[in-house]
Image (tube, rainbow, N blue to C red):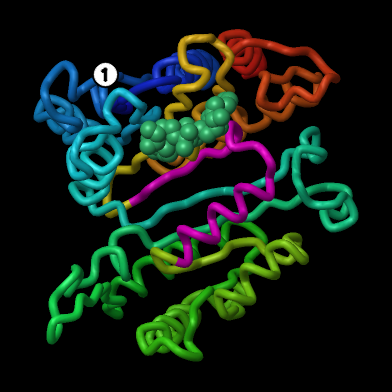
Amino acid sequence: MAYKVAVLPGDGIGPEVMEEALRVLDAVSRRFGLVFEYREAPVGGVAIDEKGMAFPNETKEICDWSQAILFGAVGGPKWEDLPPEEQPERAALLPLRKRYELYANLRPALVFPPLITSSPLREEILGGKGFNILVIRELTGGIYFGQPKGIFQDNGKKKGIDTLIYFDWEIERIARVAFQAAMKRKKRLTSVDKANVLTSMVLWRDVVKKVAQDYPQVELNHLLVDNAAMQLIRNPLQFDVILAGNMFGDILSDEASMLTGSIGMLPSASLGQGKGLYEPVHGSAPDIAGQGIANPLATILSTAMMLRHSFDQDEAATAVESAVVSVLEEGYRTSDLYRGKGKLVKTQDMGNLVAGKI
Ligand code: NAD
């Protein structure tokens, strides 16, 4: 049986890093006897140029057909003057998340031991070994989507409104994703809220506590978001899995990823009832596009997440992650990671090196 993968390279460095991710998947296919069927489709700026829209119908059909979507990155200066709702990120990524109800965003933020000096945190805070945090962010609800939303007139004055609303079932389903993820890790879960001032967050805390009864092995604690932001910097080693709503998760996952010091290393998964979307955290990096120097490891690590979460191929996923660590341990670095020591390599070399280790 072939695993069906929609391949959406997108713009800028998207196609460059995607090529290396597919090279690594080919190596996985050979080593583990897995068969992948790929269908490539345009998305983002390149789709606007070719088809007049960022998420064209033929791309939708290929995504519908697939079991998992591998996404590069979209956007760039060429499309920045379009109206906001037609711009590549807004017009491609948001409809994709909505179409497949991708409500759970998983963002591992980990410091690979060979890259420990890339973290802006002092070595004693990192305990000499770095941290490994999984941030799980609710992606389709909360204040980014709640109604009413807009700028309205009120007695001759303007008022801007956003609505923070969560239904119990929305909290329950994301909490289950977080508990299940914690079960596969160190069994520690930190739920982030602002229950001291926000009523929706009182419900958030209540529902998370209720779901916890089904996972007695997981140690659960609750942190207010302001404290969570501080604790991430003070002692990131205390965290295993962090669960947060849409806005708090947005902010904390960026903070956590910055603490690793290398945007070119960070993968992500967005999961729903069926399909998963896998993409690097970084954007299309127009400043380095076409030079063959982009770091493909975030996209390669996104394929590991796909193997694990969409195809239940844990062993193959671990092989990809171990191959990345092993190449880093041997001192190979793309220019974003290079600090004067080690061996400077280009995008394609890095892909070949990882593929060679599988
Ligand atoms: P960016 O992530 O593209 O780049 C930020 C900086 O990091 C740049 O200096 C870039 O060269 C560097 N960088 C990023 N990825 C790298 C990699 N793999 N290897 C080496 N260096 C890397 O963010 P930005 O500059 O704010 O945005 C550029 C474009 O990407 C914009 O059009 C933005 O809208 C879009 N964007 C898209 C996504 C997405 O598709 N999911 C996410 C963020 C930004």
Q: Quadrant of residue 224?
A: bottom right
Q: Horizontal placement of 84 versus 196: left or right?
A: left
Q: Is residue 246 magenta?
A: no
Does residue 73 show up?
yes
Name the residue located 62 percent from the left edge and 71 percent from the top edge: 228
In the rendered image, residue 331, in percent from the top left (x then y), is placed at 80, 20
- In the displayed structure, would residue 163 be above or below residue 108? below
Quarter of the picture holding the C terminus: top right
Q: Which residue is mark 1?
A: 40
Q: Horizontal placement of 259 versus 172: left or right?
A: right
- In the displayed structure, would residue 183 be above or below residue 77? below
Q: Quadrant of residue 137?
A: bottom left
Comparing 119 with 133, the one in front is: 119
In the rendered image, residue 249, in percent from the top left (x then y), is placed at 47, 62
The kind of residue tagged 1 is: Glu
- Badge 1 local density, few (<14 within 10 Å), some, or many (20+)? some
Name the residue located 41 percent from the left edge and 83 percent from the top edge: 201
Q: Horizontal placement of 278 versus 184: left or right?
A: left
Region in magenta:
248-271
Q: Is mark 1 within 8 Å of ligand 1?
A: no
Mark 1 element type: strand
Specify the principal SS of the magenta part. helix
Does residue 313 show up?
no
Name the residue located 30 percent from the left edge and 23 percent from the top edge: 78
Comparing 338 with 322, the one in front is: 338
- In the displayed structure, would residue 146 be above or below residue 111? below
